[in-house]
Image (cartoon, rainbow, N blue to C red):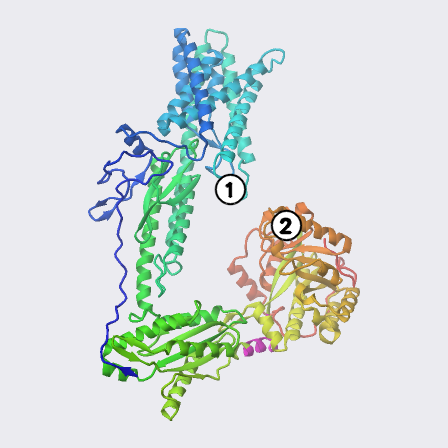
Amino acid sequence: MVRGSTSSAVPRRAGPAPRTIRRHSAPKRDNLAPEPSAGRRSPSNGTRGHGPCQNGGEKRYQIWRKEEYVRLLSEGVGEKWTLAGVTRPVFVVFAVLALTLMVISAQAAIAAPGHQWPLIVLGVLCAAALEIPKLQVGSVRHRTPVITLPVIALLALETVLPLRISVGVIVTGVLVIEVLRTQRWAVALYRAGLTGVGGVVCSLVYLGLNAPPLSVPVLITAAVASISYVAFVIAVGTFRMRYTKDAFDLGGRPMLSTRRVLLVGGGYAAVAAAAAQWNHAFADGSSQSIGVVVVLLALTLLAATEKLVIRSLIMRRRLVGMIAGVTALNASTFLETPRRDVSSDGGSGTDAATDITEMLCRAVSTTVGVESVTVRDAPPAAGEIGVVVALTAGTEQFVVAHRDPMDRGFTRDDELALRALAQTADAVVTARSDIGGLIVRANTDPLTGLPNYGAFQVSLANINEHRNYEEALAVLFLDLDDFKRLNDRYGHQAGDSVLHELGRRLRRAVGPHDVVARVGGDEFIVILTRLTSLSEAKAMAEQILADVGQPLTVGLNHFTLVLSMGLAYSAQQESDVSLLIHDADQSMLAVKRSRRAGGPSNESSLSISEHRSTAMDDLIAHAIDDDLLELAFQPIVSLVTNQIWAFEALVRYTDAELGPVSPPALVEKAKSLGRLDALTRQVAIKAMRAAADFRLEDSRIVCMTFNVEAAQIVPARLGDFVEILADRYPEISLCLELNERSVAKVSAEIRAQVEHLRDAGIMIALDDYGSEDSSVDALVRLPMDILKIDRSLVDDLADIRQREVLTALQGFGDKLEYSMIVEGVENAFMAEQLNMLGIRAAQGFHYGMPQSYEVTRHRLERFGAAAIVPTELPAAVVDEVARRDAPAAAPAAAPRAAAPAAAPASAAPIGRPVPLP
């Protein structure tokens, strides 16, 4: 099989390249930053610059902020601003208004008496101090209009200064403090203009209410005037953020928080009224100026106190956010998303970078408090802060935090928090990369780049454990014949080349979800997944043999590859996957023995093992026959009374070795084994026995439901059984839930049986309505008492279309005389929406997850039939209840004739279904 003697070496897989940092010589242009003049040298050695600098071989994190641009401007760089997130006309209008009000005020102040100038200066300082605290009135921090307090100073000055001067005083104070805070004249002029116009509105309201014929008391006048200012600022801010900024996600909440608006407006009105009342108490002329000075100093002290309180709250929030962010970043495991792809095909680390980016952005948003946070190539603009990070190998970007220009400016503490989170993210990424590289080396064959035997075993175990019930797999064991002779004759370099090419061909011959591994010198294993039959596996194996067995050339030598292949097929989940490998290996050895015994020696051959998976069959049959099935109970609640009135019984089974068995797989396997009726009987007996115990704990429990297929309710199968069982528990309404798919074709016999069971007092429910291909026909195809709405119809109740569908179904129910239960209610918002729509019953995780008999009974003991319980039951409590109730073992006992239970006085009449509350 070898022709020639020349060979070529196979290049070995290189290790991970050292992490490098690309130095930026100048910032990238964007629409937020001024353009530096050409040829300007970047800062270095610790100064804030346009990229990371190296100092002693250690990476430095550079904080980008507004001062960098101010420095560039002071060095002669032309200012080329575009206002981020707002339109230029809005800023221009308020800037012009601010300048106009200041000019008018200045003209009036020049002609004012000299004794008013100290009050003017003090008023400017007070207005500046009152501008510092920013009060947010929105549901989401930093995505809301903000309210400041300088107009209170206007109401304090109105008794000693003309309106023109008073308005100019607060405009000047706001302009001064905003220029110092932001160092952006456009933003400062906008803020000053907004405050000035709001002050004019406030003054007009104040004067209008104070003048005859209204003559409203000054206390009420000042309060109403201040509220008008708050309303004006909120209206302008809301308009600007809604119509001149890019939309941002508020998580379904409104932009404004009613509670915060009322709190800020009420507090504002109270302070303004107190200031005005104090001034008017000294309005006799002699002590008027003294009263104003006292008020202005008190307001300044109030602003300082409020700033300290807000600062302490921000520091606490920042500390909590920092702890949570760093914990989340470090808790992410490198096994989930390593920065470099560790697969053999050399993919990119895009998913890993996205994962870290999202966690970093969430941590920055929570810790720093921002309107938006992005990871981008462009450096931060004015009013933003940013840090250089490398979240993907060889690429540096900026994590940039942005706040609205009207919001609080970033502080040094914000910068340090951003830097700490960025350093943590970079450390996590580096650790993921390093550990990921080690994992790759430990699990990769260095010659072919394929997974080695250890990685193959892990892959096979994972595929077997997580495959669907109907999904089969096959293991192919391949061996290259006469490989030792090839090595001896042409050298190991030729042998390495042949193995490398064989691995490459195998990778190309299989699907993207299949696995190829090199497990020995000339042995390879393939896992074929997502199969449906043995014939499909055989056809794929034969195609692989044909593809990889093509002649190959290495240097001047030509080789014809002859392979021996064994196939082991598994139709269901295996309890021991090593048996698959063993059977495939034995089948491959059988091919070799056949070839040595005189079989074909010049062509590849395939042998199929007789392996069949029976572990799952035996396991399910044993669980049903030996009465080992368990039940979980999920409450069904009345939205009218907010109390539990029924439970749904759900089958569960946990094997000692395999762990929990999927309920759908359990039911399907029972059906294929002919034991579905036995499974249903066991569930029904245990469910009704448990219901009787639950009713002893709380008499409001009046119904128990469980699932059956429509074909099971005929008398020959379960029809007579459920009638007898319902008679044993007259105080409990038994409800059979028929899946919509099982009633797609209903015979006259089944329809008649449904009517008979309803007449006997057994309730019929149509389950999972709305899943897959539902139709209105299903509502009239079968008589029923209850319609259960699938969670897919209520997964977005904010959508008007879903609410309309539910309303229509509720209307159908009222006319067709059935009740409706909505499944999948997972939070209070959904429950509230359903209540508003008039839905009367619901089921879902919001009211409780399916729990065992012991946990459910303990819940009823502690909280009765309450729909919502304060907390989940602790594990220790559950264990204690289980130990206490172990002798009774009501729901897990073997089937036996249940003794009739005495019906409480409040029980429903025998033979009549209990209507929904």
763 lies above or below 302: below
Where 877 sits versus 223, above or below?
A: below
Location of residue 294 in the rendering, given as x and y in whole percent from the top left corner = 43, 16
Does the image show residue 573? Answer: yes
Residue 302 visible here: no
Could you say which is closer to the camera, residue 633 or residue 20? Answer: 20
Furthest residue in direction left, as rendered: 56
Residue type, label 1: Leu
Corner quadrant of residue 715 = bottom right
Counting other residues with Cα less than 10 Å from the Cα at mark 2, is it few (<14), some (14-19), or many (20 or more)?
Answer: some
Q: Nearer the viewer, residue 510 or 361?
A: 510
User: In the depicted view, which residue is nearer to us: 291 or 589?
Assistant: 589
Q: What SS does tag 2 mark? A: helix
Main secondary structure type of the part rendered in magenta: helix
The answer to whether 590 appears left or right of 712 in the picture is left
Magenta segment includes 618:
yes
Q: Say which residue appears at 77% left-offset and 69% top-offset.
A: 748
Q: Which residue is mark 1?
A: 250
Magenta-span inclusion, residue 875: no
Tell me, for residue 289, which label it has, or none: none
Q: Which residue is mark 2?
A: 802
* Residue 270: percent from left, percent from top: 53, 24
The segment highlighted magenta reads 617-629
